[in-house]
Amino acid sequence: MSFGPFALHLGTNYCPTDEEASDIKSFLVEPGLRLRRLDDKIAELQNELDKLAAERESLVVYIDGHKALISPLRRLPLDIVQEIFLACIPTHRNCVMSALEAPVLLGRICSSWRAISLSIPRLWSRLHIIEPQRSYGADLALSDIKAAQRFAVTKMWLGRSGNCPLSISLLCRAEETHIDLTLSPVALDFVGQLTATDVPLLQSVRLQYDYPVSDRRTMDLANFGMLRGPRISSFCGFGYDIIDFGEKLPLQWHQLTLLAMTTLGAWQTSLTSWSVLQILQNGIPSLTPVELNSLNTTEVGCEVVESTLSRLLDRLSLPNLRNFTLYGPASVSESPPSLAKCFARWSRLESVTISSNSFAKSSLLASIRSLPDTVQHLKIYDITNRSLPGVPSATSLDDSALAILTPTDGLPLQCPVLESFDLESCIDVSDEAILRFITARMSDPSGARLKRVTLTFNRLMTLDILPSIQPFIDAGLNISIKHFVPYKAQFSPWQGLDDAPESPTPWRCTA
């Protein structure tokens, strides 16, 4: 179409004369007629294409409908579908009352999936319950309606669980403590009605109750019949009322393998060693040792290690204790306790975690020397507190503590089956002592070789030990070493930008 009397001027800035403009109009009459004929033909063809597309779409729907009847998903055996459904359930927490995730979501896809989901009790054996908040300025009537709804959903949910073991987490909290809340928490009302007969397979109970004493609700753990469940071996209680009702907990104490109790709001209530002993005695005469023959895990965390802590531990008979943890600063009233007598009795210990500020140096060394031969995992947090009166001004953890665990000719090997060793936030343990410890443990034929060593230092590196222990690393030793390095002033022109280069951290990883 580039031919014609004015072809040379096309695409230029040429301005035709009046006579040439008239010639151009006459010249374009025939091309205009041809353009209209082409538009009509295109419209005709487009209409035919639309009819073909509609016919094709109808045919696709017809074919896809039949293919759906023979799709692999429809033909999966019921037990496979059930396993897929179970794989949709969260594993790191209990399920929530929401249609955005399984198991509720599975019942919103189609009627057949809903029927399948309702036929799997295990899908409904885990539930997280939150009491609707009743805070100052809120619509209390709306909160009551929401509470009633959640109570109904809870009953329906647990009714679908059949005879499966249940995992239930409860959260009851108040936003404003001065509000007079006369209703008992919905979750506690429901659970409080359960008896041991209702939960024959229940093994673990975790109860969190955040209401302070000044805003107490109607809750009496002593009347929680479900706590008498014949298979309950784990109880965790967190809340203000744990102290008040702890002595009346109707637990099967002899079969507990894990027990954790913490009070919230230390300015109002506190959980002392004496109160713990009163709880654990549960009617046992005060001079009789408290026997917890099934307990395998104990964790003690204190803001101040009391003078009664050692007496508490001495009163406990824990013949099957496997894991022990102690956090807390040294006592300000007397010499910090040694765990030597306890470790001598706990002959099956496998894992020990302690913080250095729970001990004076002498008691820490005595405790390490008394570790039973069964210990496989040892972790020490080096926590230095120079502000409390009566507390050693320097950390009690230094090379002498590590020397006890370092094999020495002519002396029995301490912790001969030790496999993992962690030091956290060390200050006074030297790199040289670490090198001696690792080299001797990895070379001593009388004990097990270390499999994992994790070290974090709150100081600069004085010796690079990696070249010396590289053969052990090549042989399978998993080691992580981090040293503190001081911050350097940063004057980067990228500061404040999303794509700014990463600033250096205060830790230097050497392995």
Image (spheres, rainbow, N blue to C red):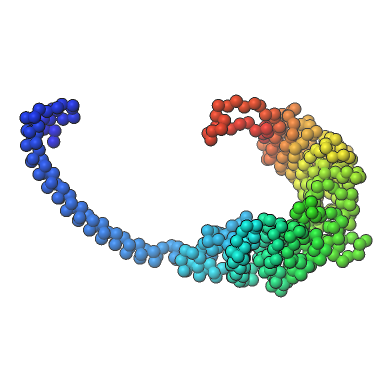
Quadrant of residue 8 in the image? Answer: top left
| Relative image position of residue 163 (x, y in whole percent) | 64, 71
Residue at point 81% right, 57% down? 320
Q: Is residue 150 visible?
A: no
The answer to whether residue 102 is above or below residue 472 is: below
Question: In percent of the image, x 62 and y 57: which residue is there?
Answer: 137
Q: Identify the residue shown where x is 74% and y is 60%.
A: 215
Going by the picture, which residue comes out furthest to the front? 137
Name the residue furthest right.
Answer: 287
Q: In the rendered image, which quarter contains the C terminus?
A: top right
Q: Quadrant of the N terminus?
A: top left
Residue at x-position 87% and y-position 49%? 306
Task: State the residue lying farthest toward the bottom.
Answer: 197
Does residue 327 lie above or below 472 as drawn? below
Q: Is residue 256 visible?
A: yes
Residue 419: x and y, percent? 75, 45
